[in-house]
Image: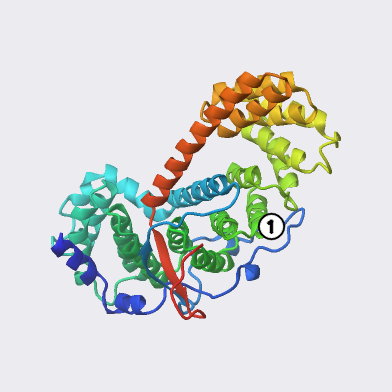
Amino acid sequence: MSHIRKAATRFADVRTLSYLAMAITLFAAAPAQTQCQPVADSVKPPTAQQNSQSAAPAFFDEPKFTVAGVTDATTPGGHGSDTVLRTKQSLAKDTVSLGKDSPGSILLDQAASDQSLRATAHPPESFEANLQQGKSLVAEGKPRDALPYLERASQLGTADKAAQDKASLHHLMAEAEEQLGNPLEAVRQFQAAAEVDPTEPNLFDWGAELLLHRAVAPAIDVFTKGNRSFPGSIRMLLGLGVALYDHGSYDQAARCLCQASDLKPDDPTPYIFLGKIQDVEIAQAEGVAERLQRFVRLQPESALANYYYAVSLWKQRKSPEDTTNFAQMDSLLHKAVRLDPKLGVAYLQLGIFYSEQEDYPDAISAYQQAIAAVPHLEEAHYRLAQAYRQNGEQAKAQQELELYGQLKKQSAGEAERQRRDIKEFVYTLRTQPSASQPK
């Protein structure tokens, strides 16, 4: 193991080592200074130049923050924090998964299925042969075996190697380190790839790695840089929106996600991100309902589209007595469960809808269907207990409260396990005297 770690250290050439002495990042801009402007009803489609996600920016800013280490995840406090945290974790993982569509990941998929990469098309000691061998091993989930080949490729690489080749090497090392459970070295290698060749995929993967490990302010900086350089990138806006949401800037996050949906209206991904955020937020951000209405219009047979738009209408009520959109909400939710009978949250929302009208028999039926679809849906058990109580069924209410308590305890334990599994980065901004981590 020691020789592998030494190899991983030697892999960084003189230029890469200088990155470690520098900080990992771009701007020290505050979240309020990001690229997501107030939402308009429509935006102009990006130009061909803006839509290019492979052209590199003409410059790269000097890093202004440092990822100094890793620590165990902090336990948040506050009412409803578990639900919000689970949503943040889910969105961060969703964001990372968007990187699987990057050119680098496509190459990894090809490497896993094409054993000819191990043939002697290049001399055994060539840069290309070692790079391809390492790429194949990373794709096969053998990062330990890949490291020596990647380190050898670094030694054989010369100054005249193209930036794309150097960036590919750094990116592969980052993939290997992440698989080995070394996120600190992984993020340094993602940074090195982005600095050598600041393409959209390299910037996105760097920002996603920071976000996954709760370096929220640095992730905002990286995604902000990426958004400015590649305004036609949907996933860069999604990453920025998720990072802003994690930071607590809900309105700005919603603006970014709305703009992402405007870039390619028929892509369901931005709408799903918007829907996940609104599910755990009380306030309705400007422009969200209009985008979710468009989601239903473009994809009327999507259960999620009908559900998310119904929720957005419900959040627009001026008061619980406001029945303006009740008929439409009821229709949307019933259509959602017809399209997907396992969509427990839609049954749950129907139960809430009926409870507000004090129609407790129908509310009870909806909550029961929600539980039948998703037995571990905590809120459905809690609200079913309240509906039983209002309906005079005290014994059933108590039984549901006990089930709710058990599920709440189980989910809290699972959330804690997930927090422990993903180490958080400790980072320092240049404007701060000492290291800090997200709270």
Left or right, residue 195 beside residue 398: left
Task: Inspect this view and state whether residue 369 appears.
Answer: yes
Q: Residues within 10 Å of mark 1 (few under 14, many from 20)?
A: some
Q: Residue at x 27, y 52 (%)?
A: 138
Q: Residue 352: x and y, percent?
A: 71, 31
- Residue 112, picture quadrant: top left
Q: Residue 228: x and y, percent?
A: 58, 68
Q: Residue at x 62, y 47 (%)?
A: 277
Task: Inspect this view and state whether residue 133 appears.
Answer: no
- Looking at the rendered structure, the kind of residue marked 1 is Asp
Q: How is the image coloured?
A: rainbow
Residue 145's place in the image compared with 163, above or below, is above
Q: Residue at x 26, y 75 (%)?
A: 13
Q: Residue 86: x and y, percent?
A: 51, 46
Q: Residue 276: x and y, percent?
A: 60, 44
Left or right, residue 56 beside residue 80: left
- Residue 193, picture quadrant: bottom left
Q: Which residue is mark 1?
A: 251
Tell me the quarter of the image containing the N terminus: bottom left
In this view, the residue in front, 403 or 420, is 403
Say which element carries label 1: helix
Number of numbered discs on residues: 1
